[in-house]
Image: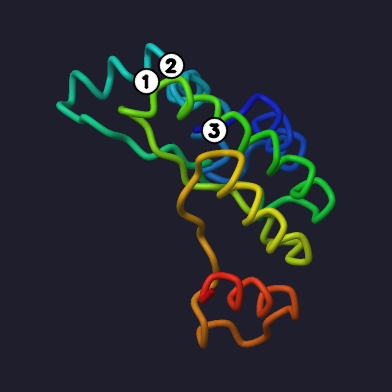
């Protein structure tokens, strides 16, 4: 899935659309499907025999954007996911977008995504895989471990 704001940010980040994934996400026949979180998406799932789908911000997500822009776009993306899940909770689940370029807001974003937005899963760096870890990521991993 994508939001109009994220698609516009991707266009600004790579105006000539040199990155293949950027070109696919913002300038192909799949773009409208990424933006559709309602009837068209559900009909496609029905045609494929899929009962429940997980909505997630498609690649390149917000991680390729400047930190401030990534943070500004993660909340509206998560709100869009939550709204779609709220309209069709029996058909949709949510995978929250987190602004990886700006790890300081992770714990707060994590909590908001869980409590207010009905999202249940998050993509985080695997412990031990990153060579350097921002202190906020360590805090976030502590929150996850609970």
Mark number for residue 13? none
N-terminal label among 1 and 3: 1
Image quarter where the C terminus lies is bottom right
According to the picture, the residue beneath numbered tag 1 turns out to be 41
* Residue drawn 63% across the image and 33% down it: 79
Secondary structure, mark 2, is loop
Task: Give the residue pinned by disc 2.
Answer: 38
Where residue 69 sits: x, y (%)? 80, 46
Q: Are marks 2 and 1 in contact (CB under 8 Å)?
A: yes
Q: Which residue is mark 3?
A: 82
Residue 128 lies, with reference to residue 97, above or below; the image says below
Marks 1 and 3, how far apart at CA = 15 Å
> Within the image, what quadrant is residue 125 found in?
bottom right
Horizontal side of 46 relative to 78 (left or right) equals left
> Would residue 113 appear left or right of 42 to someone viewing this image?
right
Circle nearer the viewer, 1 or 3: 3
- Is disc 1 placed on a helix, strand or loop? helix
Q: Residue furthest right?
A: 68
Q: Are marks 1 and 3 in contact (CB under 8 Å)?
A: no
Q: Where in the figure is residue 120, as x and y percent of width and height?
A: 46, 50
Disc 1 packing (10 Å; few <14; some 14–19; many ≥20): some
Q: State which mark lies toward you, 3 or 2.
A: 3
Q: Is 16 positioned to the left or the right of 81 in the image?
A: right
Q: Say which label, 3 or 2, has the lower sequence index.
A: 2
Residue that appears at 26% across and 24% down: 45
């Amino acid at each position: 899935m994508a939001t109009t704001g994220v698609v516009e940010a991707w266009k600004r980040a790579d105006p000539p659309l040199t990155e293949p994934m950027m070109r696919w996400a913002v300038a192909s026949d799949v773009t409208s499907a990424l933006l559709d979180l309602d009837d068209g998406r559900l009909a496609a799932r029905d045609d494929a025999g899929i009962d429940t789908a997980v909505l997630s911000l498609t690649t390149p997500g917000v991680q390729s954007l400047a930190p401030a822009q990534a943070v500004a776009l993660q909340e509206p993306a998560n709100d869009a996911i939550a709204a779609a899940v709220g309209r069709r909770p029996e058909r949709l689940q949510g995978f929250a977008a987190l602004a990886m370029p700006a790890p300081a807001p992770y714990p707060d974003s994590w909590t908001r995504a869980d409590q207010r937005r009905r999202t249940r899963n998050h993509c985080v760096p695997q412990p031990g895989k990153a060579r350097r870890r921002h202190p906020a990521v360590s805090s976030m991993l502590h929150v996850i471990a609970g």
